[in-house]
Image: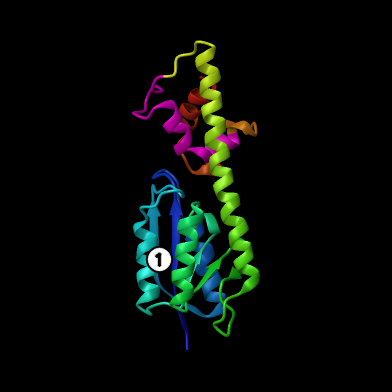
Amino acid sequence: MEVPVCILVRVSTDEQNNARQVSELEAVAERHGWKVVEVIREDGVGGSSRIRPGLARALHLAESKLVRKVMVHEVSRLSRHPAVLHDAVERLNEAGVSLYWHSQAAETLLPSGKRNPATGMMLAILGEMARYEKENLVERIHSGLAEARRRGRRLGRPEGTTLSAADLLAKHEDIVRALRAGKPLRDIAARTKKGLSTVKRVKAALVG
C-alpha cells in the first residue's frame, strides 16, 4: 500500500522559484513508493513568520489522517522560528505523521511509529542555527546601516523599490549573503533565481 505524503515548499520572496524543491522531493517520494497527494507552495513567506497558511494546510492534512508524512527540503523551509518549528513537529508527532527533510534525509518518526530521538536532537540544533543565522544577518544589516548614517550616506528607499533599505536587505537575505561572499551579480541572480535589477538594488542598499 502506498504511503500518502504531502510536500511543503516555501520561498521567502515571490521572485524565487520553488520548482527545484518540488522536483527533488517528488523524486524521493517516487524512490520510496510514497504517493504525493498534495504539493503545498508558500510563496513570499519569510521563514520567521508566524502566519503560515501552507504549514497550516500541511498540519490539517496530517491531523485529518490524509497523509502519513510531510516532506520539506530542509528544516528552515518548515520554519526559522524555533517555537513554530517545535509546535509543528509536536503536532505532527501527536498525529502519528513523520516529518521528512531532504537535506539530511531524516525523519522524525521511526518505522515503528515511535519518535526518533536522533532527529529530535538534530531538529533542536538546526532550529537554533536557523534562528541565529537570521538574527545575525539582521544585526549585520542594522550595524551596516548605522555606520552608513554615521558617514552621512543617504538611506532612503532605493530607486525602483517601495521598500526601505533595511526592509529590502532583510527580504533578500540570500542576495546579501552572496554579495558579502563576493559573488558576481549575474551569478547571484542565477543562483537565487531573482532578477538582475533586484540584485543591483540590494547591492545599492547594502553599500549605501
> Which residue is denoted by mark 1 in the rendering?
39
Q: Residue at x 48, y 32 (%)?
A: 169
Position of residue 2 relative to residue 37, above or below, is below
Depth check, front residue: 124 or 78: 124
Residue at x 53%, y 13% (from the top left corner):
150
> Is 169 inside the magenta-drawn segment?
yes
Q: Position of residue 118 (x, y in %)?
A: 65, 70
Asked if 94 appears above or below 53 in the picture, the reply is: below
10 lies above or below 152: below
Identify the residue at the far bottom of this view: 1
Packing grade of label 1 (10 A; few <14, some 14-19, many >=20) is some
Residue 117, percent from left and from top: 63, 72
**Numbered-mark total:** 1
Residue pushed farthest top? Answer: 152
Report the magenta residues as a range: 156-178
| Secondary structure of residue under mark 1 | strand
Q: Amino acid at mark 1?
A: Val
